Image (cartoon, rainbow, N blue to C red):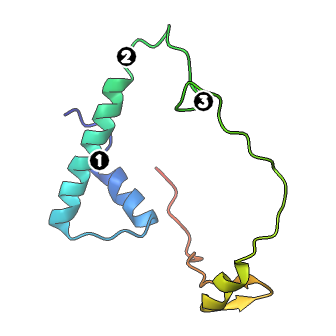
Amino acid sequence: MTQKISFEEIQRIAHLAKLYFPEEEFARFFRDVSDIVAHFEKLNELDLEHVSPTSHISWSQPPINPDEPSIWEESDLVLQHAPLVQNRYFIVPKIVDKEKEEKPS
């Protein structure tokens, strides 16, 4: 395994994502992320010059659905089970803090 991402970078990303791990678990998480990055680095070594890009996982044509607005008949059922609704919109708690994030060094 070649280390392509630093322990400090993973700590910073985890902090920004508000992920908190015990130290032992974080070390395992770092190893897993490093292994994933190393795997992608290995994939970058592949010669794909003569491989055409794909936009769909199937060789057949992708399904074409009309892009037209429609009324969803069961929206009232969903809204009546929501904890808080206003003007037919779900009201959810704000999860973004106003704390200033550290700038990358």
Of tags 3 and 2, which is closer to the observer?
3
Q: Quadrant of the N terminus?
A: top left
Of tags 1 and 2, which is closer to the observer?
2
Residue at image x 77%, y 84%? 88
Place residue 95 in its image quadrant: bottom right
Q: Label 3 vs label 1: CA separation?
A: 27 Å
The vertical placement of 67 against 88, above or below, is above
Amino acid residing under circle 1: Val
Of tags 3 and 1, which is closer to the observer?
3
Question: 49 or 78: nearer the eye?
Answer: 78
Question: 49 or 35: nearer the eye?
Answer: 49
Determine which residue is flagged by label 2.
46
Place residue 60 in its image quadrant: top right
Locate residue 74 relative to residue 13 in the image: left or right.
Answer: right
Q: Label 1 vs label 2: CA separation?
A: 21 Å
Q: Sequence-wise, which precedes: disc 1 or disc 2?
A: 1
Amino acid residing under circle 2: Leu
Query: What residue occupies the far front of the structure in this picture?
Result: 73
Residue at image x 40%, y 65%? 15
Q: Sequence-wise, which precedes: disc 3 or disc 2?
A: 2
Query: What residue occupies the far left of the structure in this picture?
Result: 24
Determine which residue is flagged by label 1.
33
**Residue 55 image label:** 3
Amino acid residing under circle 3: Ser
Q: Residues within 10 Å of mark 3 (few under 14, many from 20)?
A: few
**Image coordinates for residue 74, horizontal then vertical, percent:** 70, 77
Q: Is residue 56 visible?
A: yes
Residue at image x 29%, y 33%? 39
Q: Label 3 vs label 2: CA separation?
A: 19 Å
